[in-house]
Image: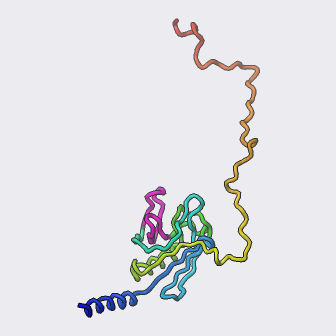
Amino acid sequence: MYRVLLGAILIFFMANSAFANVVAVIDKRTQTMTVSKDGEHLWTWKVSTGRPGYVTPNGTFHPTFLDQDHASSKYESAPMPWSVFFNGDVAIHGTVEVRRLGRAVSHGCVRLHPSNAEEFFQLVQDEGLRSVTIRVTTSRGAYDGMPPPPPRDYYRPAPRDYYRPAPRYPGSPWFAPRPRYPAVGWGWGF
């Protein structure tokens, strides 16, 4: 019995080592995605992660399912080609807004150029969901010794006098305003 159990464990570990190990590291600080297979660097691509208020979650994940021609169920059926879902409804997918890659502008997903998304989709499909690891991180370690980025003033409230009501223009001196309804006793038959 002991030999059978030892043989099963040995076969399990040998079978797992035969599969490729694909790691995709998404760096939210530099807005890049680096893909490696068995420790060998394959690609580094520009991405767009979640903008303020729509955060792409940090952590280590495995893909849950693939969809070649997905349409968003949350955001007005927005096209999400070559989707690799990894955290519930968060996915790595292609986008038509390729000019905005390299900036955090998405609703939480990781956007890629469509051709890059197709290559990543094919890699995940060929290697299998269980052998792919997706790591989303903010790599502060690579920025040690550099000055911090300048603060963003996007959400600073406007000064109080900015919201003054518009001035009221005086009515015409030649025409008196008409009442919205006739005066009592005038045309109503009372």
Quarter of the image for the N terminus: give it. bottom left
Q: Residue furthest left?
A: 1
Residue 84 shown in magenta: yes
Residue, x 59% and y 72% (percent of image)?
138
Percent across and percent down for residue 8 are: 29, 89
Residue, x 68% and y 20% (percent of image)?
177
Q: Is residue 147 above or below residue 3?
A: above
Q: Is residue 176 above or below residue 8?
A: above
Q: Is residue 27 above or below residue 37?
A: above
Residue, x 51% and y 73% (percent of image)?
114
Secondary structure of the magenta portion, mostly?
A: strand
Percent across and percent down for residue 124 are: 43, 79
- Report the number of discs: 0
Which scheme is used to colour this image of the protein? rainbow
Percent across and percent down for residue 74 are: 46, 57
Q: Quadrant of residue 3?
A: bottom left
Percent across and percent down for residue 148 are: 72, 69
Residue 14 shown in magenta: no
Residue, x 44% and y 62% (percent of image)?
71
67 vs 161, nearest the viewer: 161
The span picked out in magenta is 70-93
Q: Quadrant of residue 163?
A: top right
134 vs 85, nearest the viewer: 134
145 vs 156, nearest the viewer: 145
167 vs 59, nearest the viewer: 59
